[in-house]
Amino acid sequence: MRARDLLSPFPTVALDTPVIEAARLLAEQSLPGLIVVDEHGLPSSILPGSQVLRLAVPAYCQDDPALARVIDEAHADQLLRSLTARTVREAMPANPRELPVTDPDATALELAALMARTHSPLVAVVGDGRLLGAITLQKLLDRLMAA
Amino acid sequence: MRARDLLSPFPTVALDTPVIEAARLLAEQSLPGLIVVDEHGLPSSILPGSQVLRLAVPAYCQDDPALARVIDEAHADQLLRSLTARTVREAMPANPRELPVTDPDATALELAALMARTHSPLVAVVGDGRLLGAITLQKLLDRLMAA
């Protein structure tokens, strides 16, 4: 069982995609995260869903639960307005770590190790200089369980 | 929109649950993670799916992609055998951080901030001294998008 046998097409976003679109993709297609591609269509980052959501939270609330508490539910729509104005570029981590990106020959064990090490529910597969698709944690687990 | 309006029942595992059972729960119910409860039924940790998978990877492969590569697909079933012998206790992080646990009064903004800060696709809700349920990132996004 290699990456090439497990991968599926996966939607991508660009750095200038509005966060609201990224969030809609996540919600509508029940994705665990998003692949952000550069101008060559290659993965420049893999954003877990929780980090897309981060942009919906005003900076002054991010580290202060008390502040987030006092802003009541009537303001939930403001979260969405802030998403409209911002792009995926702003959700990118300041200190990029190892990307969960591999090639079509990766073994199941290698995929599991990569997801565990990068804390990513999603691995992008690149071969022949292009993005071939992705493998979700769910897909890998399903296949391991069925083996 | 408060946590109490968004929460749903959510399966839990205990520290001595075999990892294979935890992995099966994740796979069969398409969960983004698991709530690990203590002897009082209260959350002692929230494990993202990628960290459950971590136990399936032999220690000598975890940080060495080259080693994981040479172990070919015929050994995928060994991953599962190792899961059978181990318990959720071993998947617990060595340095526990802030838990994504809140109370029923948490606002949507507070939930978003908590998921973002703890990098968790799942928040457990505790009230009256017991676990009331959980809110997934998917559920929160769906509700925000529909607002």
Image (cartoon, coloured by chain):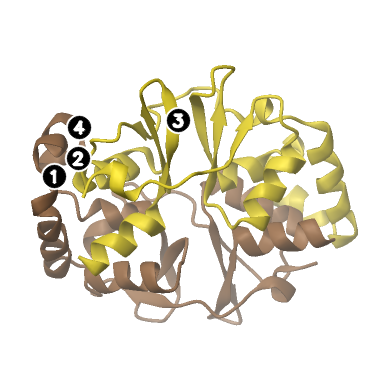
Chain colours: A brown, B yellow
Pointers 3 and 4 in contact (C-beta within 8 Å): no
Please report whichever mark, 4 or 1, sits nearer to the chain's N-terminal start: 1
The lab-note entry on whether marks 3 and 2 share a chain reads: no
Q: How many marks?
A: 4
Instruction: Specify the label residue B131 is tagged with.
Output: 3
As measured in the structure, the alpha-carbon distance from the residue carrying label 3 to the one carrying label 4 is: 20 Å
The residue depicted at 61 percent of the width and 82 percent of the height is A128
Residue that numbered label 2 is attached to: A62
| B18 lies above or below A14 | above
- Please state the horizontal and vertical placement of residue A53, each as a whole percent of the image: 28, 55
As measured in the structure, the alpha-carbon distance from the residue carrying label 3 to the one carrying label 1 is: 30 Å
Pointers 1 and 2 in contact (C-beta within 8 Å): yes
Residue that numbered label 4 is attached to: A65
Amino acid residing under circle 2: Gln
Q: Is mark 4 on a helix, strand or loop?
A: helix
Considering every residue shown, the one lying at the far right of the view is B74
Amino acid residing under circle 1: Ala
As measured in the structure, the alpha-carbon distance from the residue carrying label 1 to the one carrying label 2 is: 5 Å
- Please state the horizontal and vertical placement of residue A123, each as a whole percent of the image: 56, 62
Q: Is mark 3 on a helix, strand or loop?
A: strand
